[in-house]
Image (cartoon, helix red, strand yellow):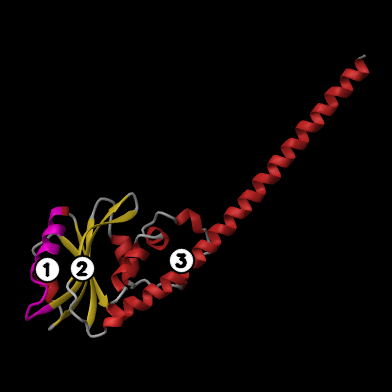
Amino acid sequence: MDKILTAIFKVESEGYQALTELKQNPETDKYVVSQAVLLKKENNGLNTLDSFDTGIETSNDTLAGGLIGGLVGILGGPIGMLLGGSLGALTGSVFDLGDALDNESIIEKVADMIMDGEVCMIALAQEKEPGQLQQKLAKFNVSIVESDAAEVEEEIEQAIKAEKELEKEARAKLREAQKEDLKNKVEEKKQQLQAGIEEVKAKVNKD
């Protein structure tokens, strides 16, 4: 079974070390790592530090094609920021992310766990027996989330739909704000014009 493993490191150098070790020996009698990327969360965004792709085929190579890229895109985009608590004010009560992602989703777990300044490694892998990669990484100060790759693919599709809805709502709110701003400016101009008229009237009457 293909799985997505996300390891969140408290120490950046340990993240680099873990990625380097997997890059040097991606295929053993216990596991096979096809792809991996090391990311750092900075200013609520995700920056790529390093990555590798061994070219080793997975049991579903079509699925694997853009899986890590898709997951990184979601985690580093509006949905990842929202789940991480950075966009709560934007959505209000209209947009309920719970309709799109359940509480056990890998996207929600990872977005909630990784803090600004921390690094995480996302890997696509197969294991001969469950837990082999976790044992490999146990020597580091790390938190690990893993899930079936097919389930992650479904989550990404749901998150993309949710992201489009979020964008749609944000644009609607922006348009509404612009209309209100324009209305206020027009009213202000009317008041200024009326004040000018009253001032002219006062001068005429005085003369």
Q: Name the image quarter holding the C terminus.
A: top right
Is residue 137 visible in the rendered image? The answer is no
Residue 15 image-quadrant placement? bottom left
- Tag on residue 22? 1
Compare residues 156 and 61 and report the one nearer the observer.
Answer: 61
Find numbered disc 1 in the image and state the secondary structure of the residue it sits on.
Answer: helix
* Neighbourhood count class around disc 2 (C-alpha, 10 Å): few under 14, some 14–19, many 20 upward: many
Which residue has dot 2 on it?
A: 36
The magenta stretch spans residue 93: no
Label 1 or label 2, whichever comes before in sequence order: 1
Q: Residue at x 46, y 66 (%)?
A: 163
Q: What residue type is disc 3 on?
A: Glu
Say which element carries label 3: helix
The label on residue 163 is 3
Give the alpha-carbon distance from disc 1 to disc 2, as whole Å: 8 Å
Say which amino acid is labelled 2.
Answer: Ala
Can you give x and y, in whole percent of width and height, for residue 195 in the image? Answer: 80, 28
107 lies above or below 2: above
Q: Which residue shows up at 88% across the image and 21% down it? A: 202
Labels 3 and 1: the sequence-earlier one: 1
Q: What element carries label 2?
A: strand
Residue range in magenta is 13-31
Q: Residue 136 location in percent, x, y?
A: 9, 70
Say which residue appears at 80% left-offset and 27% top-offset. 196
Residue located at (13% from left, 73% from top): 133
Mark 1 Cα-neighbour bin, 10 Å: few <14, some 14–19, many ≥20:
many
